[in-house]
């Protein structure tokens, strides 16, 4: 089996809510690392991303330490730097985000590599990785091969100023976007920008997930940090839902990459038995 992970590799500069300072690779690095700890020896991971010349060799070495990883979809940008993200947490889950050196969209050649894989995880780290038409084509090709396409909405709701500041613009024509995917993921902040309205409480989150599922995906997950997650999924002629409480992890220091690890775990366990409730 081959699993493609589309998105962006970034270098994170993080100030935690406890005031601690740390730096590490982020973006789809978390997806690749989490999947690398889960998959069997017959599965190959295929990260698809642009990487600046300044960190390309280091990223390749890091990714290959996670197991069977193909570098065919990792494009070295000779005249550009690897994107850098400055994250400052104001609470366990709330943060400000600044992104510098946004790379160009993924190339048709990179998308062709992804569409030939058995499963594709798209993580919109910058929101500029691919547009709705490219996502439609990718989804069509994956479905033809009876594969699986999982989309993490993430920063598809954002645009970035020249100074790297994030501006929330919402997801224009969101129904067209989510219809391309088999499963869709977003967090409690992102769903409000997708639907352009406040969403509060488990019942409203379930209703929001069901509304998004009605546009086409087989399942929609909304992650809620310390409140757990909700899942709406289609079965036969109906849409069903469930609420999952969060595990008690004790003192939480840094939540960077939690959503990325969630998507990696979901994709892998869903591919084992196609049971959405179990995988969530």
Image: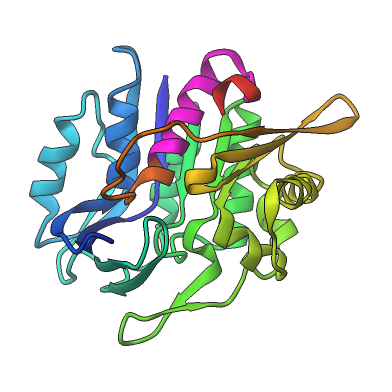
Considering every residue shown, the one lying at the far front of the view is 250
**Is residue 223 covered in magenta?**
no
Q: Residue at x 31, y 74 (%)?
A: 98
Count of marks overlaid on the render: 0
Residue 235 place in picture, x, y as percent: 81, 26
**Is residue 262 covered in magenta?**
yes
Q: Nearer the viewer, residue 248 or 146?
A: 248
Q: Residue at x 42, y 19 (%)?
A: 1
User: Is most of the magenta stretch helix, strand or loop?
Assistant: helix
Q: Quadrant of the C terminus?
A: top right
Residue 248 place in picture, x, y as percent: 42, 32
Q: Residue at x 16, y 32 (%)?
A: 64
Instruction: Identify whether 148 is placed above or below 213.
Output: above
Q: Is residue 27 visible?
A: yes
Residue 148 place in picture, x, y as percent: 58, 31
Q: Nearer the viewer, residue 216 or 132?
A: 216
Instruction: Identify whether 54 is placed above or below 215.
Output: below
Image quarter for residue 144?
Answer: top right
Q: Nearer the viewer, residue 19 or 125?
A: 19
Image quarter for residue 70?
Answer: top left
Residue range of the region highlighted in magenta in the rendering? 261-276
Residue 223 place in picture, x, y as percent: 54, 45
Instruction: Identify whether 149 is placed above or below 40.
Output: below
Q: Residue at x 46, y 56 (%)?
A: 124
Q: Nearer the viewer, residue 276 or 43?
A: 276
């Amino acid at each position: 089996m081959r699993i493609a992970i589309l998105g962006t590799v970034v270098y994170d500069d993080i100030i935690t809510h406890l005031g601690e300072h740390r730096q590490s690779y982020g973006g789809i690095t978390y997806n690749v690392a989490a999947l690398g700890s889960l998959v069997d020896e017959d599965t190959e991971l295929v990260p698809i991303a642009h990487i600046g010349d300044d960190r390309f060799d280091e990223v390749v070495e890091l990714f290959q330490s996670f197991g069977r990883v193909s570098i065919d979809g990792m494009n070295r940008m000779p005249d550009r730097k690897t994107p850098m993200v400055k994250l400052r947490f104001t609470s366990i889950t709330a943060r400000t985000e600044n992104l510098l050196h946004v790379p160009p969209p993924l190339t048709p050649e990179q998308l062709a590599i992804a569409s030939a894989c058995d499963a594709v995880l798209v993580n919109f780290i910058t929101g500029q990785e691919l547009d709705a038409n490219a996502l439609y084509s990718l989804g069509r090709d994956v479905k033809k091969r009876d594969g699986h396409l999982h989309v993490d909405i993430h920063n598809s709701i954002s645009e970035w100023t020249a100074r790297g500041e994030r501006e929330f613009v919402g997801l224009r024509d969101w129904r067209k976007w989510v219809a391309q995917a088999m499963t869709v993921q977003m967090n409690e902040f992102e769903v409000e920008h997708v639907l352009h309205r406040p969403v509060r409480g488990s019942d409203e989150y379930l209703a929001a997930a069901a509304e998004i599922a009605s546009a086409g995906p087989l399942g929609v997950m909304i992650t809620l940090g310390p409140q757990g997650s909700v899942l709406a999924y289609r079965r036969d002629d109906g849409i069903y839902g469930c609420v999952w409480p969060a595990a008690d992890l004790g003192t939480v220091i840094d939540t960077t990459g939690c959503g990325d690890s969630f998507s990696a775990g979901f994709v892998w366990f869903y591919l084992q038995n196609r049971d959405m409730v179990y995988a969530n």
